[in-house]
Amino acid sequence: MFTTTTAIPTVITFGIKIAGVVELVDTSRINKMKNLAETIFRQRLIMEGLIEQNIPPSLMVEYLEDLSDELDMVPLTAPACSYHADHGWCSHMHWITSGVHMYTWEHHKPIFFTVDVYTCKPFDDSVAVSFTKNFFKSKGLIELVHKSM
């Protein structure tokens, strides 16, 4: 596989070699979703982590409240938590400009968690990632990955 640019500099293509023939693929068509509301700003951040210690609901509440402050989001509701024995804890907090969800899988070893931030207000995703790493560092954070959309 190789990468190259086409004559149009904004389009990236990559080649897949199948049976000795290189097929060029236009990546501008991959993972494109039609924007149905161009006048509404939307930003998403997904963070996933592995951690050594359980994340109890009290810590989830503290994290979501502190994350709200870090991102300068205005809470509409307090964090709400729910539990399912087969899956683990879930917490959600509604902001005036959308909200955040957190999920834990405590039966997975090491413990897996995910945080989904969705807002209609711009925020610096690096602030959220850095804050999350620092917040869970003392709880045995092993790794944190993230994707912005």
Image: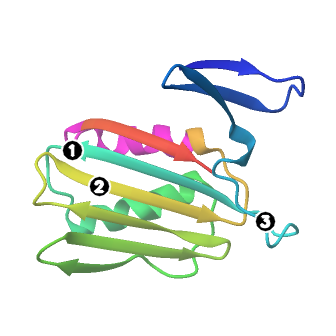
Q: Is mark 1 on a helix, strand or loop?
A: strand
Q: Which of 39 and 133 is in front in this view?
A: 39
Q: Which residue is drawn at 14% across and 43% down?
A: 52
Q: Residue at x 59, y 64 (%)?
A: 118
Image position of 127 with respect to 20: above or below: below
Mark 2 vs 3, N-terminal side:
3
- Which residue matches tag 2? 113
Is residue 142 a member of the stretch shown in magenta? Answer: no
Amino acid beneath label 2: Phe
Amino acid beneath label 1: Ile
Q: Which mark is residue 35?
A: 3
| Classed neighbour count for the residue bearing mark 2: other residues with Cα under 10 Å, few (<14), some (14–19), many (≥20) | many
Q: Give the range drawn in magenta.
A: 127-141
Tell me where residue 75 appears, x and y as whole percent: 57, 74
| Classed neighbour count for the residue bearing mark 3: other residues with Cα under 10 Å, few (<14), some (14–19), many (≥20) | few
- Which residue matches tag 1? 51
Task: State the image quarter where residue 110 is shown.
Answer: top left
Mark 1 vs 2, N-terminal side:
1
